[in-house]
């Protein structure tokens, strides 16, 4: 039977059974992050670095930020259980440091999360993204335009090679579906595309996650911090569960923050509080449309 969601989106989808094991894994991941305070190290942009760290703390994890392949290697030998690499603001030394950090995560068998902010803009960004193809990310967390651009940069089948510049999405999530599938098949990992309705895919199954708040587009770093929190969840869960837990946690916290706030400033504060206060059951029982 079609749902109201199908009627609105024209997809053949159903709400994931309330007893599906994926929901239990999401609840378990939320509880485990809160119980164990895992560290995901981040190499992330200068604009939103503070929100990334605060969001990782607010979901129960902890944070360490730096820009060095050498430091990444040291942390991979120590406390860090996942790496987050965000392409927002780049400097020339990152040409070698970022691929070194990705390589080190891969060599240690640790998950790493890529946010290809601004993919399609500039030679340095393109060069670094091309280098990542050798040790692909476990999870790609991006908006629709970045998914389309990254599939083009990696010359994946069916990719649309139009270059898009800028950090905001100029495409709808459903326009990125072919790119998201191509990226997931290429990496063998998970692709999480954010927007009004988020998409999480392993290249075979698509999970659509409605909700959240349009206020998320009026604070800088909503997407970047979602990438950081995805890495926090990747410390304790398999990549699909981690991507789902992070996106669902964000949607439920944003629903709640919107009710508490009256502008972007109070929204950001309320959102961090809501990340802390939203329960594992509220997150795991979210609507999840599968196709
Ligand atoms: N129109 C919207 N309505 C509700 N939530 C949204 C909307 N746009 C983005 N979000 C949410 O904001 C967060 C960041 O996504 P997005 O703004 O797409 O990332 P980016 O900042 O990288 O472009 C995600 O949790 C996403 O679900
Ligand atoms: C504004 C800006 N400029 C370079 S990185 C950045 C932050 C982008 O953050 P987000 O994609 O999470 O909105
Ligand atoms: Mg972004």
Image (spheres, grey):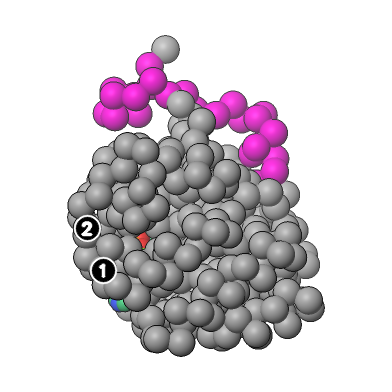
Residue numbers of the magenta segment: 2-27
Residue 166 sits above or below residue 9 on the image = below
Q: CA distance from mark 2 to mark 1?
A: 7 Å
Specify the label residue 121 is tagged with: 1
The residue where tag 2 is placed is 163
User: Would residue 231 be found to the left or right of residue 204 on screen?
Assistant: right
On the question of residue 56 being in view, the answer is no
Look at the image and say whether residue 86 sits in the magenta stretch. Answer: no
Asked whether the beta carbons under mark 2 and mark 1 sit within 8 Å of each other, the answer is yes
Callout 2: helix, strand or loop?
loop
Residue 56, position as x, y percentages in the image: 58, 71
Specify the label residue 16 is tagged with: none
Q: Quadrant of residue 240?
A: top right
Whichever of callouts 2 and 1 sits on the residue coming sooner in the sequence is 1
Residue 27 sits above or below residue 92 on the image = above
Residue 199, position as x, y percentages in the image: 42, 43
Q: Quadrant of residue 263?
A: bottom left
Look at the image and say whether residue 9 sits in the magenta stretch. Answer: yes
Q: Quadrant of ligand 1?
A: bottom left
Q: Quadrant of the N terminus?
A: top left
Residue at the far top: name it.
1
Q: Residue at x 62, y 50 (%)?
A: 239
């Amino acid at each position: 039977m079609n749902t109201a969601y199908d009627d609105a989106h024209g997809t053949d989808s159903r709400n994931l059974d309330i007893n599906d094991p994926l929901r239990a894994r999401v609840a378990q991941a939320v509880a485990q992050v809160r119980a164990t305070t895992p560290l995901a190290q981040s190499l992330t942009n200068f604009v939103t670095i503070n929100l990334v760290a605060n969001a990782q703390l607010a979901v129960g994890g902890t944070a360490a930020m730096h820009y060095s392949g050498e430091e990444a290697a040291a942390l991979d030998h120590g406390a860090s259980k996942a790496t987050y690499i965000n392409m927002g603001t780049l400097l020339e030394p990152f040409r070698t440091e970022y691929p070194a950090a990705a390589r080190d995560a891969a060599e240690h068998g640790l998950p790493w999360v890529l946010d290809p902010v601004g993919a399609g803009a500039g030679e340095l960004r393109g060069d670094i993204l091309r280098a990542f193809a050798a040790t692909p990310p476990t999870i790609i967390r991006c908006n629709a335009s970045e998914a389309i651009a990254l599939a083009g940069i990696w010359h994946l089948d069916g990719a649309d090679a139009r270059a898009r510049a800028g950090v905001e999405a100029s495409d709808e999530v459903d326009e990125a579906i072919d790119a998201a599938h191509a990226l997931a098949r290429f990496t063998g990992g998970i692709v999480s595309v954010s927007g009004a309705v988020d998409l999480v895919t392993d290249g075979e199954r698509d999970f659509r996650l409605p909700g959240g708040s349009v206020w998320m587009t009026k604070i800088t770093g909503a997407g970047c911090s979602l990438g950081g929190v995805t890495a926090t969840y990747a410390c304790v869960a398999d990549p699909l569960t981690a991507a789902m837990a992070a996106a669902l946690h964000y949607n439920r916290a944003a629903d709640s923050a919107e009710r508490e706030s009256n502008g972007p400033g109070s929204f950001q504060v309320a959102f961090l509080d809501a990340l802390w206060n939203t329960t594992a059951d509220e997150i795991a029982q979210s609507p999840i449309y599968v196709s």
